[in-house]
Amino acid sequence: MATDLLAQKLAETFDLSDDEFAILLESDSFDGELRRLADNARRSYYGTDVYIRGLIEISNYCRNDCFYCGIRRSNRYVARYRLTKNEILSCCATGYELGYRTFVLQGGEDTFYNDDLICEIVSAIRKLYVDCAITLSLGEKSHQSYKAFFDSGANRYLLRHETASSEHYGKLHPPEMKIDNRKKCLFDLKQIGYQVGAGFMVGSPYQTTQDLIADLRFLQQLEPAMIGIGPFIAHSQTPFQYFKSGSLKLTLRLLSITRLLFPYALIPATTALGTIDPFGRELGILAGANVVMPNLSPLNVRKKYELYDNKNCTGEEAAECRHCINKRINSIGFNLVTLIGNVKKR
């Protein structure tokens, strides 16, 4: 079957065989058709709206030692920080004044923030901003913990699975970390009632086409509301410091494929895309993304939350520069909206 017809088949049936996915993934000759169809699919649900979220990176302490991550436990060169409850609330106040109606609290798996403290913070945000969504991205927790956060007022939870292949997962993480637990957490979150976000790195060390297909198959099982896809970017203080970064082309291709598989999904144009290409965020939106997450963290900590080298953390991707972001989004024919922006399933 001609690959342009494969793209059309994907748009119409929301599925392909593994061999057909491999054809799309391994060729760049048909990216234009994938992008066109992905744009149509996104517009059918969201028009030209791009939702904006305020990202607050609450801590760069982490108990994990993932081989790709700059804030991994073993990195002795990280200037560690934690935000207090009042600092987090101050970030929310700034964001609300700027028009943000979703706050994303992200951090390493920092045991300092026990369940009681997270619930206290979430409850305080919920009380102050009843018209806002609260998204957490704090790693693997127990079902009981997730339920407590939800009952305190959290709406959404982001937990990228990074790779759905058990073998590949083992090459990216220390032995104590298991993909089965990560997957269990995602299904727990969905069962509790969160709008759930999963996702994966593109071009991570040892990744194969079959690994990427496994990622797509896992997402089909989970049916998440949000899907985060970004290129692997090496960090100089990790075991993967000498690996090359993931491909911009392949990342954009996967954004389009994912949009066709899940036309209803909320898909961010990630900071990593903007790091590997100055026009990366715009390219991500043109490929099918419909969310951007500028940084609301205090200015003095933004450079410290460095998952990979040369992360964009000031300038036009900063939350304070909303007019800059708006201008760039408008320049490619889309509209930045500050609505809560819940997932639209039909």
Image (cartoon, grey):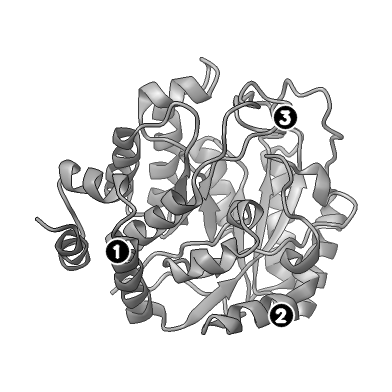
Which residue does the numbered mark 2 point to in the structure image? 99
Q: Farthest residue toward the right?
A: 300
Q: Nearer the viewer, mark 1 or mark 2?
A: 1
Distance from label 1 to label 2 (Cα)? Answer: 30 Å
Looking at numbered disc 2 in the image, what kind of residue is underneath it?
A: Gly
Mark closest to the chain's N terminus, 1 or 2? 2
Please provide percent x and percent y for residue 41.
31, 73
In the displayed structure, would residue 73 be above or below residue 31?
A: above
- 137 vs 167, left or right, is right
Tell me where residue 32 sits by quadrant: bottom left
Circle 2 SS class: loop
* Residue neighbourhood size for the residue with mark 2, other residues' Cα within 10 Å, grouped as few (<14), some (14–19), many (≥20): some
Which residue does the numbered mark 1 point to in the structure image? 260
Circle 3 SS class: loop
In the displayed structure, would residue 23 be above or below residue 206?
A: below
Q: On residue 236, which mark appears?
A: 3
Looking at numbered disc 1 in the image, what kind of residue is underneath it?
A: Leu
- 229 vs 88, left or right, is left
Distance from label 1 to label 3 (Cα)? Answer: 35 Å
